[in-house]
Image (cartoon, grey):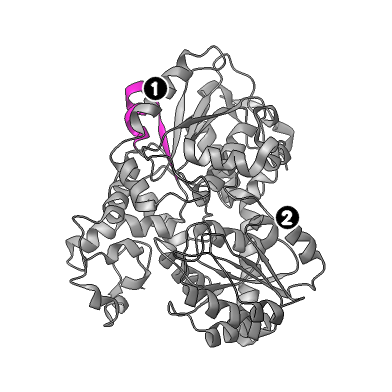
């Protein structure tokens, strides 16, 4: 299968794509960028200056202008925060507050005007903004062009954000004080969110647990961004219809312009320019690709992969409990430990632990996760339940042990464990014995482990069908391109392979 390209037009579509600054948002936006670019659309990607500097540093010459495909350019805008250590992460609430106060708006407007005046490309015809970067709508309205919203959550995560405001209206939030986190209140049943069945308060995004909603930056930021979503002419999600059928059906009753196009990572593999985009890389940390060679030396489905993503931080105690739980399980493991993983300190593990795991444990600072999760040696994944990790694990047919950190990761955990049957929960106050037992159950293929693996393979097959020609996500992607991005007389045929490259009126 090869993605189809529209015939050249006098006015080539020019789409400006704006990811939220952060690894978990950049990756899926780049996948959508690759797909759009492959259909003949000119792309301008807009990074924050901070993130672009980090990406360039981690990739070196692989990220120079000379490596970029024709019709693809990168621009930057400031995020409104002062410079700091380029190895450090931005403080998320401070960054979100800066975005909410529209610190990026004027620089973005100036950039779009400059692009429109440039002789190097056609005028901007559409903006694609991250679901939490909707300040771009103001510029789109000024120009009279569409502003498509791309949420990097699943449908369940987005629906949960949308209904956080209703929780407040019904008096379920804010929490009266922090004691409510430990008195059983988190088990309160919520059964009135469309398409989500019966969930717990605990399964809602963590920001709703605020005790001071008037001054809670993250809660108010997400409430505003979720509200702005339905102003967009199109809402794009990195999921597929069968995976979240009830939630997606409910969401489409709220907006008829919801496009499920995932898993984007799988659909991207069919792009003619896949390898060129892939070789550029978009990581804020330098990848250790040597871990793939190490995985080659391991037996099939024998390795437990551990990665808490790009923003999770743990205490030194949690790090130690995870470490000894993994060591005591006696299963080989690959563990990603970022330099800033531990709160207020470097991630340091003791010599006795390193001696214990010698020959069966590999620690790296960052890795090519998509390739890792599709490697035949991987048999399980200890995860923070970020949506990218969740959907990539489904693509790899890999069952999960779930330890969510914040945001809609709590919602994802609920679906992983209860709806899809491909994961098991561990307590937030992690203990080494619980880690050891969970790993043994999953990797030793106990009764629950076998059932999770069976379900994981089923969902992998369904994801594969969704992105094949005629599948729901394949079809939805071309609907998105034809209905939003392409001029009417240059729309792309999605019929048989014989029609590839032809336009339909």
Residue at 18% x, 60% y: name it: 169
Which element carries disc 2, helix, strand or loop?
Answer: loop
- Lower position in the chain sequence, tag 2 or tag 1: 1
Expressed as whole percent of the image width and height from the top left, the position of residue 189 reads 30, 75
Name the image quarter holding the N terminus.
top right
Residue 212 location, quadrant: bottom left
Residue 399 location, quadrant: bottom right
Quickly name the residue at label 2.
289
Residue at 26% x, 52% y: name it: 220
Expressed as whole percent of the image width and height from the top left, the position of residue 397 reads 65, 66
In this picture, residue 390 sits left or right of residue 150:
right
Q: Which residues are magenta?
A: 135-150
Expressed as whole percent of the image width and height from the top left, the position of residue 139 reads 35, 27
Which element carries disc 1, helix, strand or loop?
Answer: helix
> Where residue 110 is drawn, which disc sits there?
1
**Is residue 198 visible to the viewer in this orientation of the structure?**
no
**Is residue 65 visible to the viewer in this orientation of the structure?**
yes
User: Is residue 146 located in the magenta-colored stretch of the structure?
Assistant: yes
On screen, 188 above or below 67?
below
Toward the viewer: 216 or 458?
216
């Amino acid at each position: 299968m090869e993605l189809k390209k529209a015939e050249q037009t006098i006015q080539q579509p020019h789409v400006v794509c704006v990811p939220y600054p952060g690894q978990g948002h950049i990756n899926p936006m780049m996948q959508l960028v690759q797909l759009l670019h492959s259909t003949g659309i000119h792309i301008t990607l807009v990074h924050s200056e901070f993130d672009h500097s980090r990406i360039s540093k981690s990739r070196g010459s692989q990220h120079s202008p000379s490596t970029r495909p024709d019709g693809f350019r990168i621009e930057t805008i400031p995020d409104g925060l002062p410079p700091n250590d380029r190895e450090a992460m931005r403080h998320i609430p401070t960054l979100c507050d800066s975005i909410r106060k529209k610190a990026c708006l004027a620089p973005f407007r100036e950039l779009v005007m400059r692009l429109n005046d440039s002789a190097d490309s056609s005028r901007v015809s559409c903006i694609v903004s991250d679901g939490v970067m909707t300040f771009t709508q103001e510029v789109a309205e000024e120009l009279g062009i569409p502003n498509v919203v791309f949420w990097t959550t699943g449908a369940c995560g987005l629906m949960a954000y949308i209904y956080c405001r209703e929780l407040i209206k019904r008096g379920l939030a804010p929490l009266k004080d922090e004691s409510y986190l430990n008195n059983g209140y988190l088990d309160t049943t919520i059964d009135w969110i469309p398409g989500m069945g019966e969930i717990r308060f605990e399964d809602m995004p963590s920001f709703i647990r605020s005790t001071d909603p008037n001054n809670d930056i993250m809660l108010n930021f997400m409430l505003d961004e979720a509200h702005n979503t339905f102003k967009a002419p199109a809402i794009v999600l990195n999921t597929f219809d069968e995976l979240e059928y009830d939630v997606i059906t409910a969401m489409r009753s709220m907006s008829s312009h919801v496009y499920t196009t995932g898993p984007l990572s799988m659909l991207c593999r069919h792009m003619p320019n896949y390898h060129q985009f892939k070789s550029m890389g978009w990581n804020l940390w330098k990848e250790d690709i040597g871990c793939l060679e190490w995985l080659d030396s391991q037996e099939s489905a024998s390795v437990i992969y551990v990665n808490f993503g790009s923003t999770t931080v743990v205490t030194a105690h949690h790090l130690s409990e995870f470490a000894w739980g993994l060591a005591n399980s006696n299963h080989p493991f690959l563990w990603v430990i970022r330099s800033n993983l531990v709160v207020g300190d470097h991630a340091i593990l003791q010599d006795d632990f390193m001696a214990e795991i010698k020959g069966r444990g590999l620690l790296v600072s960052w890795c090519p996760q998509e390739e890792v999760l599709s490697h035949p040696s991987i048999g399980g994944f200890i995860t923070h339940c970020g949506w990218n990790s969740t959907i990539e694990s489904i693509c790899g047919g890999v069952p999960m042990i779930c330890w969510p950190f914040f945001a809609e990761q709590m919602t994802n955990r609920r679906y992983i464990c209860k709806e899809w049957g491909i994961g098991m929960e561990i307590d937030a106050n992690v203990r080494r014995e619980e880690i050891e037992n969970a790993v043994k159950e999953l990797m030793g293929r106990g009764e629950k482990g076998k059932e999770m693996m069976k379900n994981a393979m089923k969902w992998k097959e369904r994801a594969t069908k969704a992105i094949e020609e005629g599948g729901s996500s394949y079809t939805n992607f071309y609907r998105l391109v034809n209905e939003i991005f392409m001029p009417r007389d240059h729309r792309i045929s999605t019929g048989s392979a014989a029609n590839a490259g032809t336009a339909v009126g």
